[in-house]
Amino acid sequence: MAGDSVQLIKDRLNIIDVISPYVELHKAGRHFKGKSPFTNEKTPSFFVSPERGMYYCFSTSQGGDIFRFIEVMEGVDFKGALKILAEKAGVELVPENPQKKTERDQLYAVLEQATQYFENKLASHGPARAYLENRSVTAETIKKWRIGYAPGPPEAGWRELRQHLNTAGYNDTLLLKAGLIKTTDVGKEPFDVFRDRVMFPLRDQNGKVVAFSGRILAKDTEAPKYVNSPETDLYHKSDLLYGYDMAKHSIRQLGFWLIVEGQFDVVMSHQAGYSNTVAVSGTALTTHHVQLLERLSNKVVLALDADKAGIAAMKRAADLMLRRGIDVKVAALPDGADPADMVQKDIKVYKNAVGHSVHVIEFLLTHLKNTITDERAFKLRAREEVIPFVTLIPNHIDQEHFEGVIATALGTTKDAVHFEVTRLLEESERQSISPKSVININTTSVTPPHNPTHRKDVTLLYLLAAVSVVSAEVRSVLEVEVDSITNSNIDDLIKSLPDSALDKIIFQLEESYEKSSPLIVYEELVHKLEQLRRLYLDEQLALLRNQLTENPEVGSEVLPKILELQKKKQLPPYTVDIFSKL
């Protein structure tokens, strides 16, 4: 069972041993401390607790256990982290279907054989090498990306790869399942999918080849410029990002991801120094792609072709990412140019475009302004094509900012733009299609700090975190008092919180309590308990008074409750005496 494996891995692996290869850690009291691996900070703000098997990064406000750390550092999902840590711990993960695992291993093996075959063919094929040289692809880049060549007509036959792999012991059934050969007519021999093409291996998150994309070499042909592998048990185009295995560490270090359109664009962008570049392969950007990348950074720059199709792809991607709270910028490329061409012709122009990227809303406004001369037509198009993107932004301050940006561009008022934004939001709600339905908003972060509900939530979070830090005796006192105030079991309250909601506070309290005397800790706890008690009483009183105002007929029922709560407010405040028996 996966759950058993997870616990066994945690039992065998010390979190310090897992994190140390990535972060230089130093003992700091009960914790270990180091510089964040997610930023380029100078002052260490990354803490690890061996006691709890948890880490927390104060500079990026993220934390978790060893599995979460590997997910973020290696850019993999939980399943990927499980495999990495299982290998490190010496824990065998028994596959649900051993026969299926064997077949997958065979698929990986034959795809690796095909990759080596293509690499060797490129080394001996002058025209293919010349093509890459003419596009300024260096020998180092060719080796790094394992670029190859698939022979085919007119210089070779239709079954060169098939014959090579058959000779190596791989049968046609496996080659068909791997997407390397195909057949069209019953009784006809299968033939190679890729013929006379420059080959780009497509690799999964762990760097294993799962498919290919081939660029036609011949100029005078009606064949499609690019051919991709069909979907297989290993390759699902909606899941794979080309270059992700090479870019994941740089995305985290540079703080943003750069998305381009094709394989050549990725390769040349990396060659230009942007090792955080990825591309979709044979499909539009999907939610799964975004989930992969947002683990590493919530900032993106789109460097897509500036033609009509490129603009449409950019809009689709922005729609998907803005909904998830990602900061989306666009690098303005010259019309008709793609990143690969720009790097080849003038790398400075490409770097300038990426370095001066602007938010997608600003880009769309500029694009419309440059393509529409009639002022009224420009405003109407902006209303239809740009303002809807504002409704997708989860940050209200950011929303207001871009309402101002649009108002300035259109020569109108912020109120007019805000009216349109509100209209779209209300229209979406009426249609039960909320543009924010996929956005997880932490309400405590957007509630005004002077709101009593916010103060109550923050105080309660403090006490729930303290329960994890204090001794068992102090915890028992807190459990009784919090239960008395909230009418809720403290364990139930903790379980109701999102994962890692308390991590930051727990680390802060561990640091603070370690340096404080028991009396100071007790004084702080009773202060928080008294604050929580009064905030809860005030909230209940406000609710009852509202009921009485809205419906005076309930007075006989509500007034006694109000009087009872007012009596409770007159009770003496909490003191450290509640801990006197400890």
Image (spheres, rainbow, N blue to C red):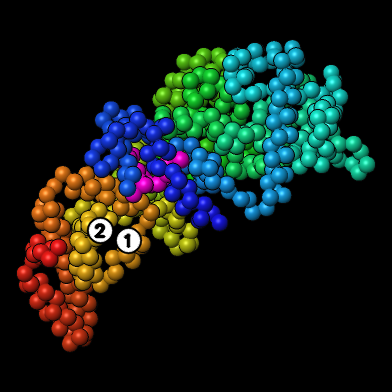
Mark 2, other Cα within 10 Å: few <14 / some 14–19 / many ≥20: many
Q: Is residue 57 magenta?
A: yes
Q: Are marks 1 and 2 in contact (CB under 8 Å)?
A: yes
Residue at the (76%, 35%) spot, across then down: 180
Residue at the (90%, 41%) spot, across then down: 185
Tell me: 219 left or right of 396: right
The residue most toward the right is: 187
Tag 2 secondary structure: helix
> Within the image, what quadrant is residue 146 found in?
top right
Q: Amino acid at mark 1?
A: Ile
Q: Amino acid at mark 2?
A: Val
Mark 1, other Cα within 10 Å: few <14 / some 14–19 / many ≥20: some
* Residue identifier under label 1: 494
Residue 369 visible, this angle: no
Query: What residue range appears in magenta?
Result: 52-70
Tell me: 337 left or right of 467: right
Closer to the camera in the image, 412 or 455: 455
Tell me: 57 left or right of 522: right
Q: Is residue 149 above or below residue 238?
A: above
Q: Earlier in the sequence, mark 1 or mark 2?
A: 2
> Within the image, what quadrant is residue 103 found in?
top right
How many numbered discs? 2
Disc assigned to residue 467: 2
